[in-house]
Image (spheres, helix red, strand yellow):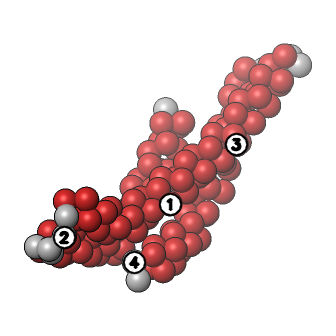
Amino acid sequence: MAELQQQLRVQEAVDSMVKSLERENIRKMQGLMFRCSAACCEESQASMHQVHQCIERCHAPLAQAQALVTSELEKFQDRLARCTMYCNDKAKDSIDAGSKELHVKRQLETCVTKCVDDHMNLIPAMTRKMKESLSSMGK
């Protein structure tokens, strides 16, 4: 049960960060992309190929932004997973060494909680970094 609560804490914090990025950065980029794409379609002298290229250029910053967010979230998730795997390995080693199950369970919970706390503390800096990167892309 404690592990589920830890997962929910992280999930809620990450969801909140993603919503903030979407509201403050991605949405503006989507608006620019759609207006830019619409302008491409207004070019009556352009060939179909030129219009498609124009639309592709309009799409590029948004695609780059979405790739950045996805990449950062994957790195965060991988780091958290490695930390919890370390906790699991430590618990298995303790059981193999003959420690009592209740003691090992407490040790595991403490370790996982520390992983979650440490990674929760990384979210504000990660958010700032992504917002800065997204702001520079949107220009």
Examine the rendered structure and indicate whether residue 55 appears above or below residue 104: below
Examine the rendered structure and indicate whether residue 138 appears above or below residue 11: below
Which residue in the protein does label 1 denote? 68
Question: Can you give x and y, in whole percent of width and height, for residue 12 in the image?
Answer: 41, 53
Give the total of numbered labels: 4
The furthest residue to the bottom: 139
| Nearer-the-camera pick, 124 or 74 | 74
Question: Can you give x and y, in whole percent of width and height, for residue 35 in the image?
Answer: 19, 75
Residue type highlighted by circle 3: Cys
Neighbor class of circle 2 (other Cα within 10 Å; few <14, some 14-19, many 20+) is few
Mark 3 or 4, closer to the camera: 4
Which residue in the protein does label 2 denote? 46
Label 3: element kind = helix
Mark 2–mark 3 Cα distance, whole angstroms, equals 54 Å
Whether residue 51 sits left or right of residue 24 in the image: it is: left
Examine the rendered structure and indicate whether residue 114 appears above or below residue 68: above
Residue type highlighted by circle 2: Ala
Which residue in the protein does label 3 denote? 83
Which residue in the protein does label 4 denote? 138
Mark 2 or 4, closer to the camera: 2
Mark 3 or mark 1, which has the lower sequence index?
Answer: 1
Examine the rendered structure and indicate whether residue 29 appears above or below residue 56: below
- Can residue 36 be seen here? yes
Mark 1–mark 2 Cα distance, whole angstroms, equals 32 Å
